[in-house]
Amino acid sequence: MARPSMRILSKYLLRQHVAPLAFALGGLTAFLMIQQIAKQFGSLVGKGLPWSVIFEVFVLSIPFIVAMTLPMAVLVAVLHTFTHLGADNEITAMKAGGVSLARMVAPVLGGAALVTLVSLVWNDQVLPRTNHRLAMLQRDITRKKPSFSLKEQVINEVVSGQFFLRAARIDPATNRLRDVTIYDLGDAPERRRIIVADSGQMAYTPRGTDLYLTLLDGEIQEVKRTEPGQFNRTFFRTNRIKVANISDTLTRTQADPYRGDRELSICELAQQVRVAKRDEARVHVEMRAAVAADLRRLAGLPVPPVPRDSERNTQPGLVCRVWAGLIAWLAPREAEAAQGPPPPPTRPIVTPGAGLGEDVSARGDRQRAATYAVEVHKKLAIAGACFAFALLGIPLALRFPRGGAGLVIGTSVTVFAIYYIGLIAGEDLGDRLIVSPFLAMWIPNLLFVLLGLAGLWVMRREGGGGRSGDWSDVRDTLLGWLRRRRA
Protein backbone atom coordinates (compact mmCIF):
# COMPACT_ATOMS: atom_id res chain seq x y z
CA MET A 1 0.00 0.00 0.00
CA ALA A 2 1.36 3.39 -0.99
CA ARG A 3 2.23 5.82 1.76
CA PRO A 4 -0.30 8.66 2.30
CA SER A 5 2.35 11.25 1.46
CA MET A 6 2.94 9.59 -1.91
CA ARG A 7 -0.76 9.59 -2.75
CA ILE A 8 -0.98 13.25 -1.77
CA LEU A 9 2.02 14.04 -3.99
CA SER A 10 0.48 12.19 -6.95
CA LYS A 11 -2.81 14.04 -6.57
CA TYR A 12 -0.96 17.33 -6.26
CA LEU A 13 1.06 16.76 -9.44
CA LEU A 14 -2.00 15.69 -11.42
CA ARG A 15 -4.07 18.57 -10.08
CA GLN A 16 -1.41 21.01 -11.25
CA HIS A 17 -1.90 19.72 -14.82
CA VAL A 18 -5.70 20.03 -14.97
CA ALA A 19 -6.00 23.81 -15.42
CA PRO A 20 -3.19 24.15 -18.04
CA LEU A 21 -4.60 21.15 -19.93
CA ALA A 22 -8.11 22.59 -20.05
CA PHE A 23 -6.86 26.07 -20.93
CA ALA A 24 -4.56 24.80 -23.70
CA LEU A 25 -7.24 22.49 -25.13
CA GLY A 26 -9.83 25.26 -25.16
CA GLY A 27 -7.45 27.88 -26.54
CA LEU A 28 -5.98 25.72 -29.30
CA THR A 29 -9.41 24.40 -30.30
CA ALA A 30 -10.83 27.93 -30.43
CA PHE A 31 -7.86 29.15 -32.49
CA LEU A 32 -8.22 26.38 -35.09
CA MET A 33 -12.00 26.81 -35.06
CA ILE A 34 -11.64 30.50 -35.90
CA GLN A 35 -9.43 29.55 -38.83
CA GLN A 36 -12.06 27.05 -39.99
CA ILE A 37 -14.82 29.64 -39.74
CA ALA A 38 -12.78 32.24 -41.62
CA LYS A 39 -12.11 29.73 -44.39
CA GLN A 40 -15.68 28.47 -44.91
CA PHE A 41 -17.98 31.19 -43.60
CA GLY A 42 -18.15 33.18 -46.83
CA SER A 43 -18.98 30.20 -49.01
CA LEU A 44 -21.65 28.91 -46.61
CA VAL A 45 -23.35 32.26 -46.21
CA GLY A 46 -23.19 32.74 -49.99
CA LYS A 47 -25.41 29.67 -50.45
CA GLY A 48 -28.28 31.19 -48.51
CA LEU A 49 -28.25 28.51 -45.81
CA PRO A 50 -30.15 28.85 -42.52
CA TRP A 51 -28.00 29.90 -39.60
CA SER A 52 -28.80 26.63 -37.85
CA VAL A 53 -27.21 24.68 -40.72
CA ILE A 54 -24.11 26.88 -40.74
CA PHE A 55 -23.80 26.43 -36.99
CA GLU A 56 -24.17 22.66 -37.38
CA VAL A 57 -21.35 22.54 -39.95
CA PHE A 58 -18.94 24.16 -37.51
CA VAL A 59 -20.14 22.11 -34.53
CA LEU A 60 -19.54 18.90 -36.49
CA SER A 61 -16.02 20.14 -37.26
CA ILE A 62 -15.12 20.40 -33.56
CA PRO A 63 -14.46 16.67 -32.91
CA PHE A 64 -11.78 16.55 -35.61
CA ILE A 65 -10.15 19.70 -34.23
CA VAL A 66 -10.22 18.29 -30.69
CA ALA A 67 -8.61 15.05 -31.90
CA MET A 68 -5.69 17.11 -33.23
CA THR A 69 -5.40 19.59 -30.35
CA LEU A 70 -5.61 17.14 -27.44
CA PRO A 71 -1.98 15.93 -27.86
CA MET A 72 -0.92 19.57 -28.21
CA ALA A 73 -2.70 20.43 -24.96
CA VAL A 74 -0.96 17.57 -23.12
CA LEU A 75 2.47 18.86 -24.16
CA VAL A 76 1.62 22.44 -23.20
CA ALA A 77 0.28 21.32 -19.82
CA VAL A 78 3.37 19.22 -19.02
CA LEU A 79 5.81 21.93 -20.04
CA HIS A 80 3.94 24.64 -18.16
CA THR A 81 3.50 22.61 -14.97
CA PHE A 82 7.04 21.32 -14.63
CA THR A 83 8.67 24.64 -15.54
CA HIS A 84 6.41 26.30 -12.95
CA LEU A 85 7.32 23.71 -10.32
CA GLY A 86 11.00 24.05 -11.14
CA ALA A 87 10.98 27.82 -11.09
CA ASP A 88 9.30 27.78 -7.65
CA ASN A 89 11.92 25.30 -6.40
CA GLU A 90 9.22 22.73 -5.67
CA ILE A 91 11.15 20.09 -7.61
CA THR A 92 14.16 20.75 -5.39
CA ALA A 93 12.00 20.50 -2.29
CA MET A 94 10.58 17.16 -3.44
CA LYS A 95 14.06 15.77 -4.02
CA ALA A 96 15.19 17.04 -0.63
CA GLY A 97 12.25 15.13 0.87
CA GLY A 98 13.47 11.90 -0.70
CA VAL A 99 11.15 11.84 -3.73
CA SER A 100 12.92 10.28 -6.70
CA LEU A 101 12.60 11.42 -10.30
CA ALA A 102 10.75 8.22 -11.19
CA ARG A 103 8.24 8.87 -8.41
CA MET A 104 7.57 12.40 -9.71
CA VAL A 105 7.20 11.21 -13.30
CA ALA A 106 5.04 8.14 -12.67
CA PRO A 107 1.69 9.86 -11.86
CA VAL A 108 2.08 12.28 -14.77
CA LEU A 109 2.75 9.45 -17.22
CA GLY A 110 -0.20 7.57 -15.71
CA GLY A 111 -2.41 10.57 -16.33
CA ALA A 112 -1.05 10.83 -19.88
CA ALA A 113 -1.90 7.16 -20.43
CA LEU A 114 -5.47 7.86 -19.28
CA VAL A 115 -5.74 10.82 -21.68
CA THR A 116 -4.38 8.53 -24.41
CA LEU A 117 -7.20 6.06 -23.73
CA VAL A 118 -9.78 8.86 -23.85
CA SER A 119 -8.29 10.08 -27.12
CA LEU A 120 -8.45 6.55 -28.55
CA VAL A 121 -12.15 6.21 -27.71
CA TRP A 122 -12.75 9.70 -29.15
CA ASN A 123 -10.93 8.89 -32.41
CA ASP A 124 -12.57 5.48 -32.74
CA GLN A 125 -16.18 6.23 -31.81
CA VAL A 126 -16.98 9.94 -31.79
CA LEU A 127 -14.88 11.16 -34.70
CA PRO A 128 -16.11 8.69 -37.40
CA ARG A 129 -19.74 9.44 -36.59
CA THR A 130 -19.37 13.21 -36.73
CA ASN A 131 -17.24 12.93 -39.88
CA HIS A 132 -20.03 10.91 -41.50
CA ARG A 133 -22.71 13.40 -40.52
CA LEU A 134 -20.54 16.29 -41.71
CA ALA A 135 -19.85 14.57 -45.04
CA MET A 136 -23.59 14.00 -45.61
CA LEU A 137 -24.37 17.61 -44.72
CA GLN A 138 -21.66 18.94 -47.03
CA ARG A 139 -22.99 16.84 -49.91
CA ASP A 140 -26.49 18.17 -49.25
CA ILE A 141 -25.18 21.73 -49.23
CA THR A 142 -23.37 21.13 -52.52
CA ARG A 143 -26.63 20.07 -54.16
CA LYS A 144 -28.34 23.31 -53.12
CA LYS A 145 -28.44 25.91 -55.94
CA PRO A 146 -29.49 29.41 -54.83
CA SER A 147 -29.71 32.08 -57.51
CA PHE A 148 -26.85 34.20 -56.25
CA SER A 149 -24.46 31.24 -56.41
CA LEU A 150 -24.43 31.69 -60.19
CA LYS A 151 -21.17 33.16 -61.37
CA GLU A 152 -20.77 35.96 -63.86
CA GLN A 153 -19.04 35.33 -67.20
CA VAL A 154 -19.33 31.56 -66.59
CA ILE A 155 -21.58 28.95 -68.17
CA ASN A 156 -23.57 27.78 -65.12
CA GLU A 157 -25.26 24.38 -65.18
CA VAL A 158 -28.79 25.07 -63.90
CA VAL A 159 -30.27 21.64 -64.71
CA SER A 160 -27.74 18.87 -65.06
CA GLY A 161 -27.05 18.19 -68.73
CA GLN A 162 -30.12 20.12 -69.92
CA PHE A 163 -30.14 23.83 -69.10
CA PHE A 164 -27.14 26.15 -69.00
CA LEU A 165 -27.07 29.89 -68.33
CA ARG A 166 -24.43 32.55 -68.85
CA ALA A 167 -24.74 36.21 -67.85
CA ALA A 168 -22.23 39.02 -68.11
CA ARG A 169 -23.63 40.69 -64.97
CA ILE A 170 -25.67 39.24 -62.08
CA ASP A 171 -27.11 41.43 -59.32
CA PRO A 172 -27.66 39.12 -56.32
CA ALA A 173 -29.82 41.75 -54.57
CA THR A 174 -32.42 42.09 -57.34
CA ASN A 175 -31.69 38.91 -59.39
CA ARG A 176 -31.26 41.11 -62.47
CA LEU A 177 -29.28 39.70 -65.40
CA ARG A 178 -27.42 41.48 -68.20
CA ASP A 179 -26.23 40.06 -71.53
CA VAL A 180 -27.85 36.65 -71.07
CA THR A 181 -27.17 33.50 -73.08
CA ILE A 182 -29.11 30.27 -72.44
CA TYR A 183 -28.27 26.85 -73.88
CA ASP A 184 -31.41 24.69 -73.75
CA LEU A 185 -30.72 21.01 -74.40
CA GLY A 186 -33.89 19.73 -72.77
CA ASP A 187 -35.18 18.04 -75.94
CA ALA A 188 -31.80 16.71 -77.02
CA PRO A 189 -30.86 15.09 -79.26
CA GLU A 190 -33.86 16.16 -81.36
CA ARG A 191 -33.51 19.90 -80.81
CA ARG A 192 -30.92 22.52 -79.84
CA ARG A 193 -31.93 25.99 -78.70
CA ILE A 194 -29.79 29.01 -77.91
CA ILE A 195 -31.55 31.99 -76.37
CA VAL A 196 -29.82 35.37 -76.31
CA ALA A 197 -31.25 38.38 -74.45
CA ASP A 198 -30.14 41.87 -73.57
CA SER A 199 -31.36 41.58 -69.96
CA GLY A 200 -33.52 39.47 -67.71
CA GLN A 201 -34.97 38.84 -64.28
CA MET A 202 -34.90 35.67 -62.15
CA ALA A 203 -37.56 34.59 -59.65
CA TYR A 204 -38.33 31.44 -57.68
CA THR A 205 -41.62 29.86 -56.76
CA PRO A 206 -42.52 30.11 -53.06
CA ARG A 207 -41.21 26.59 -52.41
CA GLY A 208 -38.11 27.25 -54.44
CA THR A 209 -38.62 24.24 -56.70
CA ASP A 210 -39.03 26.10 -60.01
CA LEU A 211 -37.15 28.97 -61.61
CA TYR A 212 -38.84 31.66 -63.71
CA LEU A 213 -36.79 33.69 -66.18
CA THR A 214 -38.17 36.85 -67.79
CA LEU A 215 -35.93 37.77 -70.73
CA LEU A 216 -36.10 41.09 -72.59
CA ASP A 217 -35.09 42.06 -76.15
CA GLY A 218 -33.53 38.95 -77.57
CA GLU A 219 -33.77 36.11 -80.05
CA ILE A 220 -34.12 32.33 -80.13
CA GLN A 221 -31.93 30.27 -82.44
CA GLU A 222 -33.21 26.74 -82.99
CA VAL A 223 -31.96 23.76 -84.95
CA LYS A 224 -33.73 20.39 -85.25
CA ARG A 225 -31.81 17.21 -85.88
CA THR A 226 -34.65 15.84 -87.99
CA GLU A 227 -34.42 18.89 -90.31
CA PRO A 228 -30.70 19.67 -90.63
CA GLY A 229 -31.24 22.08 -93.53
CA GLN A 230 -33.59 24.34 -91.58
CA PHE A 231 -32.56 27.06 -89.11
CA ASN A 232 -35.21 28.94 -87.11
CA ARG A 233 -34.59 32.38 -85.68
CA THR A 234 -37.24 34.12 -83.58
CA PHE A 235 -37.02 37.64 -82.16
CA PHE A 236 -38.87 38.67 -79.01
CA ARG A 237 -39.36 41.64 -76.72
CA THR A 238 -40.41 39.57 -73.70
CA ASN A 239 -39.88 35.87 -73.23
CA ARG A 240 -40.87 34.00 -70.08
CA ILE A 241 -39.28 30.64 -69.36
CA LYS A 242 -40.08 28.21 -66.60
CA VAL A 243 -37.33 25.83 -65.51
CA ALA A 244 -38.78 23.08 -63.34
CA ASN A 245 -37.09 21.08 -60.59
CA ILE A 246 -34.67 23.78 -59.47
CA SER A 247 -34.18 23.15 -55.78
CA ASP A 248 -33.38 26.22 -53.73
CA THR A 249 -34.05 24.43 -50.47
CA LEU A 250 -31.68 22.26 -48.49
CA THR A 251 -32.76 18.61 -48.62
CA ARG A 252 -31.20 16.69 -45.75
CA THR A 253 -30.02 13.13 -46.21
CA GLN A 254 -31.24 11.04 -43.29
CA ALA A 255 -29.08 7.97 -43.88
CA ASP A 256 -26.23 7.16 -46.24
CA PRO A 257 -24.73 3.64 -46.22
CA TYR A 258 -21.54 4.79 -47.89
CA ARG A 259 -18.68 5.71 -45.57
CA GLY A 260 -15.18 6.84 -46.45
CA ASP A 261 -12.08 5.69 -44.61
CA ARG A 262 -12.32 8.61 -42.16
CA GLU A 263 -15.91 7.71 -41.34
CA LEU A 264 -15.15 4.19 -40.07
CA SER A 265 -14.07 2.93 -36.67
CA ILE A 266 -10.82 1.07 -36.16
CA CYS A 267 -12.43 -2.38 -36.27
CA GLU A 268 -14.43 -1.48 -39.38
CA LEU A 269 -11.23 -0.27 -41.04
CA ALA A 270 -9.46 -3.47 -40.01
CA GLN A 271 -12.23 -5.49 -41.63
CA GLN A 272 -11.80 -3.56 -44.87
CA VAL A 273 -8.07 -4.31 -44.71
CA ARG A 274 -8.83 -8.03 -44.42
CA VAL A 275 -11.27 -7.85 -47.33
CA ALA A 276 -8.70 -6.09 -49.53
CA LYS A 277 -5.99 -8.61 -48.65
CA ARG A 278 -8.37 -11.47 -49.38
CA ASP A 279 -9.16 -9.95 -52.77
CA GLU A 280 -5.44 -9.62 -53.53
CA ALA A 281 -4.83 -13.27 -52.64
CA ARG A 282 -7.85 -14.27 -54.72
CA VAL A 283 -6.38 -12.55 -57.79
CA HIS A 284 -3.26 -14.73 -57.65
CA VAL A 285 -5.24 -17.91 -56.94
CA GLU A 286 -7.60 -17.30 -59.82
CA MET A 287 -4.72 -16.45 -62.13
CA ARG A 288 -2.93 -19.69 -61.35
CA ALA A 289 -6.21 -21.56 -61.82
CA ALA A 290 -6.73 -19.83 -65.18
CA VAL A 291 -3.24 -20.80 -66.38
CA ALA A 292 -3.76 -24.39 -65.26
CA ALA A 293 -7.14 -24.47 -66.99
CA ASP A 294 -5.58 -23.27 -70.26
CA LEU A 295 -2.95 -25.99 -70.08
CA ARG A 296 -5.53 -28.68 -69.33
CA ARG A 297 -7.69 -27.42 -72.18
CA LEU A 298 -4.75 -27.67 -74.58
CA ALA A 299 -4.07 -31.20 -73.35
CA GLY A 300 -7.71 -32.18 -73.80
CA LEU A 301 -8.28 -32.73 -70.10
CA PRO A 302 -11.39 -31.65 -68.20
CA VAL A 303 -11.20 -28.20 -66.62
CA PRO A 304 -12.09 -28.12 -62.90
CA PRO A 305 -14.03 -25.15 -61.52
CA VAL A 306 -12.11 -22.24 -60.06
CA PRO A 307 -11.94 -22.70 -56.27
CA ARG A 308 -13.71 -20.16 -54.11
CA ASP A 309 -12.08 -19.03 -50.90
CA SER A 310 -13.97 -18.87 -47.65
CA GLU A 311 -15.13 -15.76 -45.86
CA ARG A 312 -13.56 -16.74 -42.53
CA ASN A 313 -10.50 -14.52 -42.96
CA THR A 314 -12.72 -11.42 -43.14
CA GLN A 315 -14.36 -11.95 -39.74
CA PRO A 316 -13.42 -9.56 -36.90
CA GLY A 317 -10.54 -10.61 -34.69
CA LEU A 318 -10.72 -11.29 -30.96
CA VAL A 319 -9.60 -7.77 -29.98
CA CYS A 320 -12.24 -6.15 -32.18
CA ARG A 321 -14.96 -8.48 -30.85
CA VAL A 322 -14.06 -7.61 -27.27
CA TRP A 323 -13.82 -3.90 -28.08
CA ALA A 324 -17.16 -3.91 -29.91
CA GLY A 325 -18.78 -5.68 -26.97
CA LEU A 326 -17.37 -3.12 -24.55
CA ILE A 327 -18.61 -0.20 -26.66
CA ALA A 328 -22.04 -1.84 -27.03
CA TRP A 329 -22.22 -2.29 -23.24
CA LEU A 330 -21.25 1.32 -22.56
CA ALA A 331 -23.43 2.89 -25.27
CA PRO A 332 -25.62 0.31 -27.06
CA ARG A 333 -27.68 2.78 -29.10
CA GLU A 334 -24.76 4.77 -30.42
CA ALA A 335 -22.78 1.61 -31.16
CA GLU A 336 -25.69 0.18 -33.14
CA ALA A 337 -26.08 3.40 -35.15
CA ALA A 338 -22.37 3.55 -35.86
CA GLN A 339 -22.13 0.22 -37.64
CA GLY A 340 -20.25 0.72 -40.84
CA PRO A 341 -21.23 -0.33 -44.32
CA PRO A 342 -21.10 -3.95 -45.37
CA PRO A 343 -17.84 -5.07 -46.92
CA PRO A 344 -17.39 -3.97 -50.54
CA PRO A 345 -18.56 -6.47 -53.13
CA THR A 346 -16.13 -9.26 -53.67
CA ARG A 347 -14.15 -9.46 -56.86
CA PRO A 348 -15.80 -11.51 -59.57
CA ILE A 349 -14.25 -14.84 -60.39
CA VAL A 350 -11.67 -14.54 -63.15
CA THR A 351 -12.51 -16.68 -66.14
CA PRO A 352 -9.76 -18.77 -67.67
CA GLY A 353 -7.50 -16.77 -69.90
CA ALA A 354 -8.66 -13.37 -68.62
CA GLY A 355 -5.70 -12.56 -66.39
CA LEU A 356 -3.70 -9.96 -68.26
CA GLY A 357 -4.30 -7.39 -65.52
CA GLU A 358 -3.14 -9.50 -62.58
CA ASP A 359 -0.39 -7.13 -61.43
CA VAL A 360 -2.58 -4.04 -61.84
CA SER A 361 -5.49 -5.62 -60.00
CA ALA A 362 -3.32 -6.97 -57.18
CA ARG A 363 -1.59 -3.61 -56.74
CA GLY A 364 -4.97 -1.88 -56.53
CA ASP A 365 -5.99 -4.24 -53.74
CA ARG A 366 -2.69 -3.63 -51.93
CA GLN A 367 -3.20 0.12 -52.15
CA ARG A 368 -6.76 -0.22 -50.88
CA ALA A 369 -5.55 -2.30 -47.94
CA ALA A 370 -2.74 0.19 -47.26
CA THR A 371 -5.14 3.14 -47.28
CA TYR A 372 -7.36 1.55 -44.64
CA ALA A 373 -4.36 0.32 -42.62
CA VAL A 374 -2.83 3.80 -42.64
CA GLU A 375 -6.07 5.22 -41.26
CA VAL A 376 -6.09 2.57 -38.49
CA HIS A 377 -2.55 3.44 -37.42
CA LYS A 378 -3.29 7.15 -37.78
CA LYS A 379 -6.09 6.95 -35.20
CA LEU A 380 -3.86 4.95 -32.87
CA ALA A 381 -0.80 7.17 -33.41
CA ILE A 382 -2.65 10.43 -32.74
CA ALA A 383 -3.98 8.95 -29.50
CA GLY A 384 -0.49 7.65 -28.62
CA ALA A 385 0.95 11.12 -29.22
CA CYS A 386 -0.61 12.22 -25.92
CA PHE A 387 1.73 9.86 -24.05
CA ALA A 388 4.73 10.54 -26.32
CA PHE A 389 4.40 14.32 -25.89
CA ALA A 390 4.16 13.99 -22.11
CA LEU A 391 7.26 11.79 -22.05
CA LEU A 392 9.13 14.33 -24.17
CA GLY A 393 7.97 17.39 -22.25
CA ILE A 394 8.98 16.24 -18.75
CA PRO A 395 12.79 16.17 -19.24
CA LEU A 396 12.71 19.38 -21.29
CA ALA A 397 10.87 21.22 -18.53
CA LEU A 398 13.13 19.77 -15.82
CA ARG A 399 16.28 20.66 -17.75
CA PHE A 400 15.20 24.28 -18.36
CA PRO A 401 12.84 25.11 -15.47
CA ARG A 402 13.19 28.87 -15.90
CA GLY A 403 12.36 28.86 -19.58
CA GLY A 404 8.89 30.17 -18.78
CA ALA A 405 6.33 30.94 -21.46
CA GLY A 406 9.04 31.20 -24.10
CA LEU A 407 10.07 27.60 -23.57
CA VAL A 408 6.45 26.40 -23.56
CA ILE A 409 5.49 28.23 -26.75
CA GLY A 410 8.76 27.65 -28.63
CA THR A 411 8.99 23.95 -27.79
CA SER A 412 5.31 23.34 -28.45
CA VAL A 413 5.35 24.99 -31.87
CA THR A 414 8.51 23.12 -32.87
CA VAL A 415 7.21 19.74 -31.71
CA PHE A 416 3.80 20.27 -33.29
CA ALA A 417 5.33 21.27 -36.62
CA ILE A 418 7.68 18.28 -36.71
CA TYR A 419 4.97 15.85 -35.64
CA TYR A 420 2.23 16.90 -38.03
CA ILE A 421 4.57 17.33 -41.00
CA GLY A 422 5.78 13.80 -40.30
CA LEU A 423 2.18 12.61 -40.00
CA ILE A 424 1.13 14.13 -43.33
CA ALA A 425 4.24 12.92 -45.14
CA GLY A 426 3.92 9.46 -43.60
CA GLU A 427 0.28 9.17 -44.65
CA ASP A 428 1.23 9.96 -48.25
CA LEU A 429 4.12 7.47 -48.23
CA GLY A 430 1.94 4.78 -46.68
CA ASP A 431 -0.88 5.26 -49.20
CA ARG A 432 1.66 4.98 -52.04
CA LEU A 433 3.07 1.69 -50.65
CA ILE A 434 6.53 3.23 -50.16
CA VAL A 435 6.69 2.41 -46.43
CA SER A 436 4.56 0.17 -44.23
CA PRO A 437 1.47 1.76 -42.63
CA PHE A 438 2.88 1.17 -39.14
CA LEU A 439 6.14 3.00 -39.79
CA ALA A 440 4.40 5.70 -41.81
CA MET A 441 2.25 6.73 -38.84
CA TRP A 442 4.37 5.77 -35.83
CA ILE A 443 7.83 7.13 -36.70
CA PRO A 444 7.15 10.60 -35.14
CA ASN A 445 5.81 8.96 -31.97
CA LEU A 446 8.76 6.57 -31.72
CA LEU A 447 11.20 9.44 -32.26
CA PHE A 448 9.70 11.55 -29.46
CA VAL A 449 9.47 8.55 -27.10
CA LEU A 450 13.17 7.79 -27.63
CA LEU A 451 14.09 11.44 -27.09
CA GLY A 452 11.96 11.55 -23.94
CA LEU A 453 13.52 8.37 -22.51
CA ALA A 454 17.01 9.67 -23.31
CA GLY A 455 16.18 12.96 -21.61
CA LEU A 456 14.89 11.22 -18.48
CA TRP A 457 18.03 9.07 -18.36
CA VAL A 458 20.24 12.15 -18.59
CA MET A 459 18.22 13.94 -15.89
CA ARG A 460 18.47 10.87 -13.65
CA ARG A 461 22.26 10.82 -14.04
CA GLU A 462 22.44 14.53 -13.22
CA GLY A 463 20.26 14.09 -10.19
CA GLY A 464 16.96 15.16 -11.73
CA GLY A 465 16.89 18.49 -9.95
CA GLY A 466 17.40 20.69 -12.94
CA ARG A 467 20.00 23.43 -13.16
CA SER A 468 17.65 26.41 -13.01
CA GLY A 469 18.16 26.80 -16.72
CA ASP A 470 16.55 29.45 -18.84
CA TRP A 471 16.76 30.34 -22.54
CA SER A 472 20.47 31.14 -22.25
CA ASP A 473 21.06 27.55 -21.15
CA VAL A 474 19.06 26.32 -24.11
CA ARG A 475 21.31 28.35 -26.38
CA ASP A 476 24.49 27.15 -24.63
CA THR A 477 23.33 23.54 -24.83
CA LEU A 478 22.70 23.80 -28.57
CA LEU A 479 26.03 25.55 -29.22
CA GLY A 480 27.86 22.93 -27.18
CA TRP A 481 26.21 20.15 -29.13
CA LEU A 482 27.17 21.79 -32.43
CA ARG A 483 30.80 22.17 -31.28
CA ARG A 484 30.98 18.49 -30.34
CA ARG A 485 29.55 17.54 -33.73
CA ARG A 486 32.19 19.60 -35.55
CA ALA A 487 34.98 18.13 -33.44
Image (cartoon, rainbow, N blue to C red):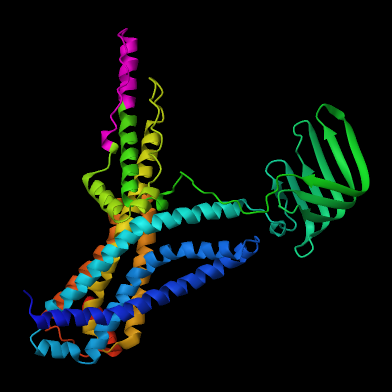
Q: Compared to 301, does 73 lie above or below?
A: below
Question: Is 187 or 340 nearer to us in this picture?
Answer: 340
The correct choice, above or below, for 21 with respect to 277 in the image is below
The residue segment tinted magenta is: 286-313
Relative height, residue 288 to residue 297 (above, below): below
* Percent coordinates x, y for residue 224 in the rendering: 83, 31
Look at the image and tell me in which quarter the C terminus lies.
bottom left
Closer-to-camera residue (4/270): 4
Residue lying at 39% horizontally and 46% vertically, measured from the top left: 340
In the image, residue 324 lies at what x, y percent?
Answer: 28, 49
Front residue of 242 and 349? 242
Viewer can see residue 264: yes
| Left-right relation of 309 to 139 | left
| Residue ID at (41%, 34%) | 345
Q: Residue at horizontal 31%, vertical 15%?
A: 295
Residue 372, position as x, y percentages in the image: 36, 48
Residue 297: within the magenta? yes
Q: Is residue 477 visible?
A: no
| Residue 161 drawn in magenta | no
Which quadrant holds residue 354?
Answer: top left
Question: Residue 396 falls in which quadrant of the image?
Answer: bottom left
> Across the whole image, how many numbered discs are drawn on residues?
0
| Residue 109 placement, left or right of 71 | left
Q: Position of residue 90 (x, y in %)?
A: 19, 90
Q: Quadrant of residue 466?
A: bottom left
Q: Quadrant of the N terminus?
A: bottom left
**What residue occupies the far top of the structure in this picture?**
300
Which residue is more in the foreground, 80 or 229? 80
